[in-house]
Structure formats: structure tokens, C-alpha cells
Image (tube, rainbow, N blue to C red):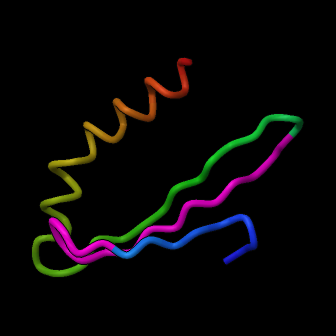
Amino acid sequence: MSAKAVALRTTEPVGGIFELTTMEWGGTAAIVVGGHLYGPDGATVRDREQPAWEAWAAKLAAG
């Protein structure tokens, strides 16, 4: 993990870990988010929540 990153551990709705980091490319700044949800319900929660996260990210990107 870089000095410009933070790791977050989740416990609800399932256990997981996420990393948020910043980067700059060609004068444009970006936040990169990656993560994993664990346990038998991890994939179910991911599939249920993914559309909402994608809509949120698209709204942010649109300004």
C-alpha cells in the first residue's frame, strides 16, 4: 500500500477489505477503489450492491 492509500475493513453486511488510493495521470487526479467481500454471502452482497455503487460513481464522474 502506498503513502497515498488507506485500507478499510468491513464487518457489515459481510466481512471485507477495501483499498482507496489516489493517482495522477496526465494532469488528471483519480481515486482508485478496490476490494473484496468475504464469506458465503460475499458474492451475493456484491451483486446486490454493485448497481448502486456504479450509479454513485457515474454521478461523481459526471460532476
59 left or right, relative to 43: right
Q: Quadrant of residue 58?
A: top left
Q: Position of residue 7 (x, y in %)?
A: 51, 73
Please provide the residue range marked out in magenta: 10-25
Q: Position of residue 32 (x, y in %)?
A: 59, 53
Where does the C terminus fall, quadrant-wise? top right
Q: Nearer the viewer, residue 43 or 29?
A: 29
Question: Residue 38, position in %: x, y?
Answer: 25, 78
The residue drawn where x is 80% and y is 35% is: 28
Q: Residue furthest right?
A: 26
On the rendered image, what quadrant is the N terminus found in? bottom right
How many labels were placed on the picture?
0
Relative to 34, say whether 56 is above or below.
Answer: above
Q: Is residue 60 above or below residue 45?
A: above
Find out whether residue 16 is within the magenta segment.
yes
The residue depicted at 55 percent of the width and 26 percent of the height is: 61
Residue at 52%, 67% in the rendered image: 19
Whether 22 is drawn above or below 18: the answer is: above
- Indicate the position of residue 31 as horizontal and vertical percent values: 62, 48
Q: Could you tell me which residue is drawn at 42 percent across and 67 percent down? A: 35
Q: Main secondary structure of the magenta part?
A: strand
Left or right: residue 32 versus residue 37 is: right
Residue that extends furthest to the bottom in the rendered view of this protein: 39
- Assess whether residue 24 is covered by the magenta stretch: yes
